[in-house]
Image (cartoon, rainbow, N blue to C red):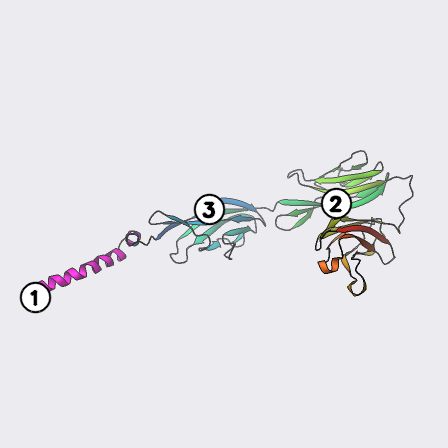
Amino acid sequence: MRGRGVRAVARLLPVVLVAGLLGVGGAESASALGSPVLLSITVSPSLSSVAEGATQQFTATGLYSDLSTKNLTDSVTWSSAQGLLATVSNAVGSQGLAKGLLPGVDTVTATDPSSLLSGTGALTVLPAVLTAITVSPSVASVAEGATQQFTATGLYSDGSTQNLTDSVTWSSAQGLLATVSNAVGSQGLATGLLPGVDTVTATDPSTLLSGLGALTVLSTLLPPPSPTSPVLTMTPGSGSARTGVVAHGADFVPGQLVTVTYMSGLRARKRASAVLCSTTVDAQGTFSCGGTIPRRHRSGKRGQHPVVATEPSNTKGTTIFTLFK
């Protein structure tokens, strides 16, 4: 009987040893059985800052009991402590991408859903920064001695806009053709000096970002341009089907609706024209609007195609778009 008891204990001993490994000393036990376990999570960068509306990519790295590491960015659950200051994406393809919402300091956390281990990083959201400046009007004309008011609008990282006319530095490229005032109360007011085409620039003094506008100074010795022969230009002036274009007009009738149409040159049932854009002419008789050259079966054959800008008063301007195929 004693012999059979000893043999039974001997058979149970490996089972008891394995159970002990699994129940005691978690990380060491799992490693001993060949399955390393997660010990910690590190979030990188540990300290970072973004402007309102801007983004910051965070990554999560796991350290395991066998001292190996693994990128866990796509498998952890991301969150932010404040919630209102920043968001962190858990969407496929953008996991860990944080976006600043409001100024302040937030904590970004990466949590492993199975072990509930987590790592953190600090994100400081700074006030929105200036990303671009637009000068309006983009195209203008004045007679010698006459004036034209330009305005500068700033676009910020959070998508907001602000009138910067009084805070930017104004200048003209040619200098002798036109001057642009920086005096208090008349910032952005350009005066035509000599006939020619000048460039008006608005520059933010802190970021050095700038925006441009074109100013044509007309000679007072020449008759004013005919209201029935306004100027129409296209940017770009050539391209393929579906090319995005911007139409610029000058010397149109102020206050009227102008429609810009692309003429394909197709005939009979295939005849086709496409309205690129419509807008209202400003007080200076200028406008800018954008559109897209139509699809291949409506854009016509390769070569030059008229683009016409018309007003209800029958005022018309034309230019040419060169189609590539």
| Numbered circle sitting on residue 1 | 1
Which residue corresponds to the image point at 79% horizontal and 65% vertical from the top-left?
Answer: 269
Q: How crowded is mark 2: few (under 14 residues within 10 Å), some or many (20 or more)?
A: many
Earlier in the chain: of badge 2 and badge 3, it is 3
Position of residue 79 measured from the top left corner of the image (x, y, whole percent): 48, 54
* Disc 3 secondary structure class: strand
Residue placed most toward the observer, 230 or 189: 230
Q: Is the magenta stretch mostly helix, strand or loop?
A: helix
Q: How crowded is mark 1: few (under 14 residues within 10 Å), some or many (20 or more)?
A: few
Mark 1 in CB contact with mark 3 (< 8 angstroms): no
Which residue is label 3 attached to?
Answer: 44
Residue furthest to the top: 176
Span colored in magenta: 1-29
* Disc 2 secondary structure class: strand
| Numbered circle sitting on residue 151 | 2
Earlier in the chain: of badge 1 and badge 2, it is 1
Say what amino acid the circle numbered 2 marks. Answer: Thr
Say what amino acid the circle numbered 1 marks. Answer: Met
Position of residue 33 measured from the top left corner of the image (x, y, whole percent): 28, 54
Q: Residues under labels 1 and 3: Cα distance?
A: 65 Å
Task: Tell me the quarter of the picture where residue 273 sits.
Answer: bottom right
Which residue corresponds to the image point at 73% horizontal and 40% vertical from the top-left?
Answer: 201
Position of residue 94 measured from the top left corner of the image (x, y, whole percent): 52, 54
Task: Tell me the quarter of the picture where residue 18 sits.
Answer: bottom left
